[in-house]
Image: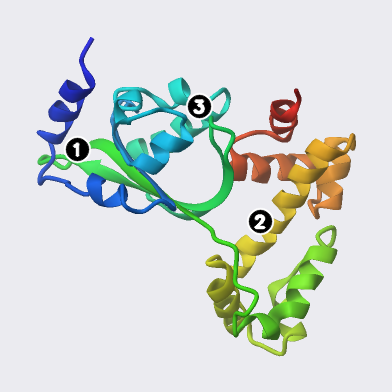
């Protein structure tokens, strides 16, 4: 079996130019950084990812695949996402996700992934980061102008939430509303609505005995299948798997 050092060396020798950013990401605790080869094995990771995977150092990650670090079905879901990048050269840009790490840490973040090419323009890996979303400051200058909208979203997640209607409520254009939401939450207006609905669903799944169908309706989804698709895309788990994961 190849050692972590051999795996790293074999991979980086194939790059068209050295990628020496791993140590920089070690200094950024609110970003999880990684690089994987075409087989889905980690060849680089920063300290934040190591901590959230519950390993002491990078040797605990290098050479392993997602399904060896993350419990099922999360590892499989992450691998499937990577395959979209590897097979179709399709980047992932600012995808809102609720990450559930093996150390028990849960946190919202924006995920970015890019394919990595060799000298012959063949895809040989995928690089990615997930940037943590931080709690907004209560004294944000933009908060007062959209406070009614934010409260309305929280109190009406079971209803259709249309951006033109929300913007009109704040006497803003859709663009202005989106810019102010981004300045507060670092995400778009649409992503904020998704985040609010998924947060509510997570609470209902773990704190109540409501059926998944009822939770879907109370969180504003027209049917259970649409809710399940959105929930899995955001968390990596189906609603049932998320509920089962939280059980003692």
Residue 52: image location, x then y, percent: 47, 37
Please state which of residues 191 and 57 is positioned toward the viewer in this rendering.
57
Mark-to-mark CA distance, 2 and 1: 36 Å
Contact between marks 2 and 3 (CB within 8 A): the answer is no
Mark-to-mark CA distance, 2 and 3: 23 Å
In this view, 144 is above or below 116: below
Can residue 17 be seen from the camera position used here? yes
Residue drawn at x 40%, y 51% as measured from the top left: 29
Please identify the quarter of the rendering in which residue 185 is found.
bottom right
Q: How many dots with numbers?
A: 3
The answer to whether residue 230 is left or right of residue 201 is: left
The label shown at residue 195 is 2
Mark-to-mark CA distance, 3 and 1: 28 Å
- Where is mark 1, residue-wise? 122
Residue drawn at x 74%, y 43% as measured from the top left: 202
In this view, 105 is above or below 110: above
- Where is mark 3, residue-wise? 70
Residue 207: image location, x then y, percent: 84, 39
The answer to whether residue 130 is left or right of residue 11 is: right
């Amino acid at each position: 079996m190849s050692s972590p050092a051999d795996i790293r060396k074999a991979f980086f020798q194939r790059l068209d130019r050295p990628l020496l950013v791993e140590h920089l990401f070690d200094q950024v605790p609110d970003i999880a950084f990684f690089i994987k080869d075409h087989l889905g094995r980690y060849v680089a990771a920063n300290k934040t990812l190591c901590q959230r995977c519950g390993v002491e150092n990078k040797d605990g990650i290098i050479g392993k695949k997602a399904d060896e670090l993350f419990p099922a079905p999360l590892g499989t879901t992450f691998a499937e996402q990577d395959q979209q990048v590897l097979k179709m050269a399709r980047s992932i840009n600012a995808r809102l996700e609720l990450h559930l790490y093996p150390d028990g840490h849960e946190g919202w973040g924006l995920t970015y992934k890019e394919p990595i090419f060799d000298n012959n323009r063949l895809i040989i890996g995928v690089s990615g980061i997930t940037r943590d979303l931080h709690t907004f400051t209560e004294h944000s200058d933009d908060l007062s102008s959209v406070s009614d909208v934010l409260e309305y979203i929280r109190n009406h997640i079971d209803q259709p939430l249309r951006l033109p209607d929300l913007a009109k409520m704040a006497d803003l254009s859709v663009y202005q509303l989106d810019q102010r939401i981004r300045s507060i939450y670092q995400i778009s207006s649409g992503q904020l609505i998704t985040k609010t609905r998924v947060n509510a669903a997570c609470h209902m799944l773990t704190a109540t005995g409501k059926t998944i169908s009822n939770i879907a309706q109370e969180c504003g989804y027209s049917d259970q299948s649409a809710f399940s698709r959105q929930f899995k895309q955001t968390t990596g788990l189906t609603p049932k798997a998320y509920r089962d994961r939280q059980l003692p």
